[in-house]
Image: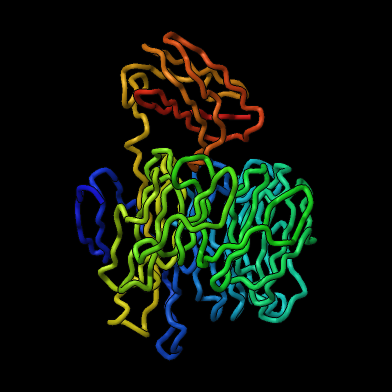
Amino acid sequence: MGILKNIFVLTLMYSVLFPQSFNTYLMGYMQGNYQYPPNAPNYVGDEFGKRLAAGDINGDGYDDLAVFSFYTSTGLLSGEVDVFFGSSPFDTIPDITLKGEYDLQLFGSGILMNGDYNSDGVNDLVIGVVGQNDDRGLVKIFFGGSPFDTTADLIFQENGNINAYFGSDLASVDFNSDGYDDLLVGAPNDRDVFLYFGGADMDTVADGVFHRLFWSLNTAGDFNNDGYEDFITSGNNWSHLYYGGDTVNTDVNLIFHASGDIEANDYNGDSFVDLYFSLTGIFLGGEIPDTTLDITAPVEFRGNPAAGKYNMDGFSDLILGQSGNGCGVVYLHLGNNPMNNIPDGYFYDTGCGKLGYRTAAGDFNGDGADDMAFSERWYQNYFEFWPDYKIGRVYVFSGDTTSLSVSEDVPTLSQDFRLFDPYPNPFNAVVTIPFELDNNSYVIARLFDIKGRLVDVFINEEKTAGFYEFTYQANTIPTGVYFIRFTTNTGSDVKKIILLK
């Protein structure tokens, strides 16, 4: 774990332990506010934080955080979703509140915010309501924008069995690689996954149905490197991966002897998608995908996962929430090459509130590094107050921005090269990136979006010493905030650019 930086205990009932190389601070916390009366046993408190989701649904360049509450004032198990818009500084006052209307509706039992289904450049909000449609479930899409419209734009429902739990599992992929994100909706009790293609005129008719036993549904990135995004379902000891393509093929393409919640990302920085399974470990991606387990999962490498670029070092990282481990703990695992299963830090719940029940990642304060969000189902002491108090709480901790350049003219790690300010900035379609090399060097220039996802590699070659001006054309990427990471033999630097179309 390296040199320990600090251990401190706050009145918020957790302690934090991190290596000296990682800097974080508490950006804020939110908590529920509704408690059922004591004469309603087993249905007390709101369990605020039972589900979390992150994405920029108002198009302001900040990721937003959505929080699902189990119980609300509108009805027993009616459900509520509070959305906190990202900002700098981040505030903890909900900007949008959407509620169920009657008992057992479970409005918000599925939440998704990382898909843009009409390709307007803004992510959309997807909410599953498993207790509606005669308990078969339905899904609502609210197209993103500013101001955000709280009237649903599309409603999806299927004629499955009662208690099919349609909408409890949601995922977003560009399955057919047409530039529109597509929506995957799981109905686990019917063993069905429904695929709906996105489009300028998206409809609510399923474009494919996949049938197999599963407990969770997740995107798998482009695991087979064919230019189409894939998805994966996890069941009891086995998981099944389906390749994307121009046409829908419902046959299973890969089978993994693995289970648990899945998070797909590049943890070892080799540009291939890796698959993390919360009960099994990591299957590393490669030019030819395989189903051999590469990194096993001891106790400290298990939990509810959320992947993000928490320290912006070019690797994707993981937080893993374990609400069932004692009073609750959240482990931090920083990506590396080689990737390992040893934690780099943790948050430990000293108040026995079941910390780490759900996790999420997003750049909520717009500083370029993803931030960490995780919930505590019962922030008061579980043993002391049970069963009369189950109000939840969600904590948001900052990512580490110390690896990002904070200088306008001086590179962060080396004086052997200089990366100057790109111009014009903001820009419309073409930006010029000036840099100077004192010595011959191999140069790699990568473009990342505000979520830390690799968008493009536009320089990847040996260059002689001298001054250069590289012209980058951004015709194929949407409006947003981006980061240029410039790397030579001796160091690296980062510049922020803003694309406005």
Rendering colour mode: rainbow
> x and y percent of residue 294 in the render?
46, 55
Please state if 28 lies on the left or on the right of 223 as rendered: left
Residue 445 drawn at (x, y percent): 49, 26
Looking at the picture, tell me which residue is in the foreground, 350 or 290: 290
Q: Is residue 347 left or right of residue 113?
A: left
In front of the other: 323 or 70: 323
The image quadrant of residue 160 is bottom right
Say left or right for 196 vs 42: right
Q: Nearer the viewer, residue 368 or 58?
A: 368
Q: Position of residue 231 (x, y in %)?
A: 63, 56
Residue lying farthest to the top in this orientation: 466
Residue 414: name its quadrant. top left
The answer to whether residue 109 of the structure is visible from this angle is: no
Left or right side of 351 for 105: right
Q: How many marks?
A: 0
Residue 268 vertical placement versus 73 (above, below): above
- Residue 376, above or below 112: below
- State the residue in front, 336 or 189: 336
Q: Does any portion of residue 275 appear in the rendered image?
A: yes
Residue located at (75% from left, 64% from top): 209
Look at 54% across and 50% down and name the residue there: 55
Residue 388 in picture, x, y percent from top left: 36, 84
Quarter of the image that includes the C terminus: top right
Q: Residue at x 73, y 61 (%)?
A: 251
- Outermost residue toward the bottom in this view: 39
